[in-house]
Image (cartoon, grey):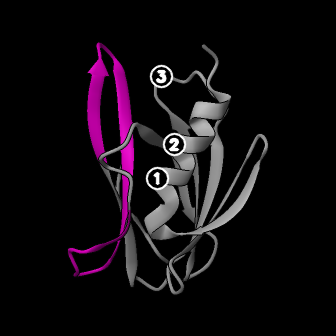
């Protein structure tokens, strides 16, 4: 996926692509202020992949996520880049957390909803 830049150009979403199996790719997002290296939200060390990333306005980003290997429903994550608060919505999930707790919250939800 190509970088997705906010309408005001202050933030961007970049993607780290990893091939985990033959023709199975994870496109993990990282959100940063333009020109800075420290991420506001980083999912690149996880198995969460973005199917879509779009800016709702200059400060709110919506991403449709799924976790490899695809054995659980997808979730929608809405990040407010100004407050670093994340709203996560999915099957049985409607939670607001800090950006730093996002991966932990997503992983707990995944463990509870993965079809095994």
Res 30 quadrant in image: bottom left
85 relative to 68, above or below: below
Q: In the rendered view of the protein, which quadrant contains the C terminus?
A: top right
Task: In this rendered view, identify the residue nearer to me: 59 or 109.
Answer: 109
- Marks 1 and 2: in contact by CB < 8 Å? yes
Q: Position of residue 41 (x, y in %)?
A: 40, 66
Mark 3 or 2, which is nearer the eye?
Answer: 2
- Marks 3 and 1: in contact by CB < 8 Å? no
The magenta-colored residue range is: 16-41
Residue 114 inside the magenta-drawn segment:
no
**Residue at image mark 3:** 69
**Residue at image mark 2:** 107
Task: In this rendered view, identify the residue nearer to me: 38 or 25.
Answer: 38
| Residue sitting at x 54%, y 24% | 70
Res 78 quadrant in image: bottom right
Query: From mark 1 to mark 3, how far is it between C-alphas?
Result: 16 Å
| Residue sitting at x 55%, y 82% | 58
Q: For residue 103, which numbered disc appears in the image?
A: 1
């Amino acid at each position: 996926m190509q970088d997705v830049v906010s309408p005001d150009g202050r933030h961007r979403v970049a993607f780290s692509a990893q091939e985990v199996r033959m023709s199975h790719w994870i496109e993990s997002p990282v959100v940063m202020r333009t020109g800075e290296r420290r991420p506001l939200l980083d999912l690149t060390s996880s198995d969460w992949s973005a199917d879509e990333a779009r800016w709702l306005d200059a400060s709110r980003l919506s991403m449709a996520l799924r976790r490899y290997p695809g054995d659980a429903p997808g979730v929608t994550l809405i990040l407010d880049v100004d407050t670093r608060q994340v709203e996560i919505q999915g099957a049985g999930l409607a939670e607001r957390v800090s950006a730093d707790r996002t991966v932990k919250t997503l992983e707990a939800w995944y463990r509870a909803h993965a079809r095994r």
